[in-house]
């Protein structure tokens, strides 16, 4: 397989539109409800892009389109310059996802080792290598080896979400989508997992979907603001969001209760989650 062209973005969206049937439509209202409208952006290799917006802004729909779970009405989704469906078919295991509802995204009858093995099955490693890979993945996400035989209900929320992250890493992906992946966890656990995601990043690219400005600022290189399904702004976190002229960002900041100093301190001092 030829090496990818480094000048081509890893992921590109070009004029993507998505709508759904409007079941409350009348002769005075459109028949379809527009979710995403003329969406265009790039994700470079090894970078982290935050997708930030209020509830209903189209964030999770965008994730499903990128993952190939749904198709856009029009526009292009390209991976390494290739049409998304064709690229995914030829690159099995190179995209992973971590969803918000970690409890429903795992089989309740699977033990921790079985959950992580699902990710290994999506990759290229032979089954004979799984026995050594599972403990290594657990160590990478700070899950103690003695939890390998536990069922999901026997884990804390933070432990189970880290198991889901281990499953996402198991196929050795180039790209992971985090769809509100840690928003339901307590603040100290969120901070520890953000630290973990930075530590394991390597050359992977992330899309980090969230409604939390502080989390996005701490983790992401850039933040794309979604409003009513449109790009309101694309911002660099290195230059500081407070300097942005985006009216929508200022509105979000004004309506947000900021715990930045506590959150940042927790992230900087994060240690392995107590067992």
Image: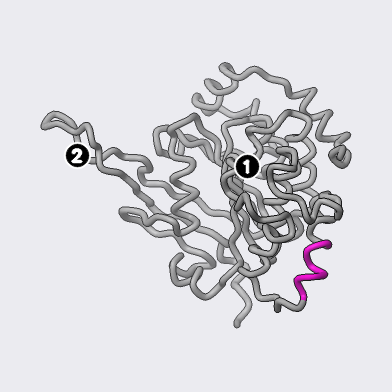
Where disc 2 sits, the SS reads: loop
Residue 125 at x, y percent in the picture: 70, 75
Q: 11 and 208: which one is in front?
A: 208
Residue depicted at 66% across the width and 38% down the height: 182
Which of the 4 image quarters holds residue 203?
Answer: bottom right
Q: Which of marks 1 and 2 is in front?
A: 1
Looking at the image, can residue 231 be seen? yes
Q: Are discs 1 and 2 less than 8 Å apart at CB?
A: no
Q: In which quarter of the image is residue 264?
A: top right
Q: Main secondary structure of the magenta part?
A: helix
Drawn side of residue 242 relative to residue 156, left or right: left
Residue at image x 30%, y 44%? 20
The C terminus lies in quadrant: top right
Residue under pointer 1: 181
Where the N terminus falls, by quadrant?
bottom right
Mark 2 = which residue?
31
Check the image and report above or below for 81 versus 14.
below
Q: How is the image coloured?
A: one colour
Per the model, the C-alpha gap separating discs 1 and 2 is 33 Å
- The relative height of residue 130 versus residue 229 in the rendered view (above or below) is below
Region rendered in magenta:
129-135
Residue 13 lies left or right of residue 109; in this view the side is left
């Amino acid at each position: 397989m030829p090496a990818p062209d480094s000048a081509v973005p890893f992921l590109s969206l070009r004029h993507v539109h998505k709508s759904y049937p409007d079941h409350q439509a009348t002769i005075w209202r459109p028949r379809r409800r527009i979710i995403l409208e003329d969406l265009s952006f790039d994700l470079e290799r090894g970078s982290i892009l935050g997708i930030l917006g209020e509830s209903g802004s189209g964030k999770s729909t965008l994730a499903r389109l990128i993952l190939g779970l749904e198709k856009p009405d029009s526009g292009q989704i390209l991976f390494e310059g290739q049409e998304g469906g064709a690229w995914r078919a030829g690159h099995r295991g190179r995209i992973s996802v971590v969803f918000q509802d970690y409890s429903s995204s795992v089989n309740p009858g699977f033990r921790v080792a079985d959950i992580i093995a699902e990710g290994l099955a999506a990759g290229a490693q032979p089954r004979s290598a799984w026995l050594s890979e599972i403990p290594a993945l657990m160590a990478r996400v700070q899950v103690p080896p003695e939890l390998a035989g536990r069922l999901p209900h026997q884990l804390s929320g933070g432990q189970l979400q880290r198991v889901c992250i281990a499953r996402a890493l198991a196929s050795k992906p180039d790209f992971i989508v985090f769809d509100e992946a840690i928003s339901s966890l307590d603040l100290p656990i969120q901070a520890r997992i953000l630290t973990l995601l930075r530590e394991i990043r390597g050359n992977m690219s992330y899309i980090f979907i969230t409604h939390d400005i502080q989390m996005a600022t701490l983790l992401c290189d850039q933040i794309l603001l979604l409003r009513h399904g449109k790009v309101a702004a694309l911002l660099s976190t290195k230059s500081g969001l407070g300097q942005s002229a985006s009216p929508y960002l200022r509105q979000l900041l004004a309506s947000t209760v900021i715990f930045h100093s506590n959150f940042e301190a927790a992230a900087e001092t994060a240690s392995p989650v107590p067992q």
